Image (cartoon, coloured by chain):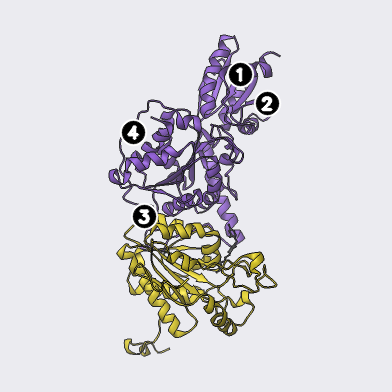
Amino acid sequence: MDKTIVKAGNLVYRRTPVMNDNVMHYCPGCGHGTVHRLIAEVIEEMDIQSETIGIAPVGCSVLIYNYLEIDMQEAAHGRAPALATAAKRLMPEKYVFTYQGDGDLAAIGTAETIHAANRGEDISVFFINNGIYGMTGGQMAPTTLPGMVSSTSPYGRDIKMMGNPLKITELVARLPGAYFVTRQAVHTPSSVRKAKKAIRRAFENQTHKKGLSLVEIVSNCNSGWKMTPVEANKWMVDNMFPFYPPGDIKLNGKLVNKEKE
Amino acid sequence: MKGNEAIAEAAIRAGADAYFGYPITPQSEVLEYLMAEKPHERTGMVVLQAESEIAAINMVYGGAACGRKVFTSSSSPGISLKQEGLSYIAGAELPCLVVNVVRGGPGLGTIQPAQSDYFQATRGGGHGDYRVIVLAPYSVQEMADFVGMGFDLAFKYRNPAMILTDGALGQMMEKVLLKEQQPRMTEYPEWATTGKGTDREKNVITSLDLDSAGQEKFNRKIQDKYRQMKEEEVRFEVTECEDAEYLIVAYGTSARICQKSVQLARDKGIKAGLFRPVTLFPFPEKPLREMAEKVKGVLSVEMSAGQMVEDVLLAVNGRIKVGHYGRMGGILPTADEIVEALENKFAKK
Ligand SMILES: Cc1ncc(C[n+]2csc(CCOP(=O)(O)OP(=O)(O)O)c2C)c(N)n1
């Protein structure tokens, strides 16, 4: 390739140096890779690579530390907010974030999530809600929709027997320690742009020391849902969005719409 | 000073960076003392009451991953909850200090002192092939002294260290000589996650290796560390052992009581001596074997159904008769009871 083609003026895309060339293990169409990239881009744009510590979850994104060029800690399942609490309290001048799936954050790690938020830890939480346990092969998650099929709800989630899906993001938004809570998606170019803004805001909030920021990304799991990537995105819009509507839930410490659940 | 308070004060003075804990009897004084003492004003140390022991040990994990001197304390039921975190911390090769002020179990058990967590402490406790360095104080002075020693060993080996004590020592008041205040660290180990500068590769703290060959290699590496501990870190104490015909082996509170038993036995003409393991992992296997070769019998005394006695048996390896005497459920054995047990097992025959 002629290197001269790449001039500032006609450069349309470049990989951020906060990400590396490692081939990702994600299924084609999965949202994890996109969110990784957005986080990496924000870190580059804010010039905070040397000041950022990320906490990885247990789940499909357990290996996020193989792709991001930042210092990272790999937590036990659900415990990322506890690790982040310590890292931030010991190094208050650094940027600390967790990256967690819905099983990690809203089932096994519910206590750590709620209490880190309620204490108002100055951390950013990136929460990927794909309605399923991706890594272990598509079992029911706390976020699995009523009637939704998974390997442990093979006839659809029966809420009488299996309980209700948990809107943990709305729950966190009601806690006084949560400063910014939003729900986003990454299935279209415009949603990617919006999600990136939210991620940036979550990082920037750490300088205000006003409390925890949580960005939920409603995402797909085409392998777990047994759909093609295109079908999965359509299914997400038709089924996940009515239950998990994208939009800001809490801005600058204030609930956006009190009527919202 | 109470044993629990001595641990807290010694930690501040050892330059600890953070403590994360959750209340449980009989060790709540550690957290209470630290909260009252405001170490953030004295040294900048962080103290936080976590929402559970699980959160507390994972805060320790996060703090240790930043290269800091961090510790937690709890008692038996809480220590059970910490086992997941301990396994991860050992698997990620991080230093930390954990204090277990043991109470009687199983389950909620009792709030009275016991030594029934010996297996859990010395065999790793959580999942996987790992060990924790275990120190067993027998006085309030040692409660304080072992804090600094625990941190030093933890950093030397990048491995969790545990002070295994019990409710009696935790609540006991004794005079204690404390060390001068040490400064907190200002430079952190090169592996710490403190932010990736341009001058180095990124640091990743993880216990995951999906490649079996890599995982086995890692296991070999940590086993080498445990072997090195066995060679370099064994600590024990002997009293009245030169001419002893019978050896009592006991640690912690039991050892304290057995000091008296040795005197009582000698008053009766039974030549008893006390062998006190100070490190429970690594267990003083070789020295105990050598001592045992010179006596007629060994009595292991514990506040448990007989846990350390298995290590005594392994050390002695069938060469000499080994007995066990224990009380459970929070009951301390009396010095007389122990002498009687010694007589019944060996001396009368
Ligand atoms: C203590 C513990 N329990 C269970 C598991 C098995 N496990 C691994 S990942 C996972 C679920 C992850 O689901 P989620 O957090 O939704 O993330 P995803 O894989 O969908 O991105 C489970 C249950 C584990 N590793 N540790």
What residue is shown with label 1? B337
Q: CA distance from mark 1 to mark 3?
A: 51 Å
Q: Nearer the viewer, mark 4 or mark 3?
A: 3
Q: Amino acid at mark 3?
A: Arg
- Where disc 3 sits, the SS reads helix
- Sequence-wise first label, 4 or 1: 4
- Where disc 1 sits, the SS reads helix
Q: Nearer the viewer, residue A135 or B287?
A: A135
- Sequence-wise first label, 1 or 2: 2
Q: Amino acid at mark 2?
A: Arg
Residue B217 position (above or below residue B334): below
- Where disc 4 sits, the SS reads loop
Q: Chain of mark 2?
A: B
Circles 4 and 1 on the same chain: yes
Report the disc number at residue A156.
none
Q: Chain of mark 4?
A: B
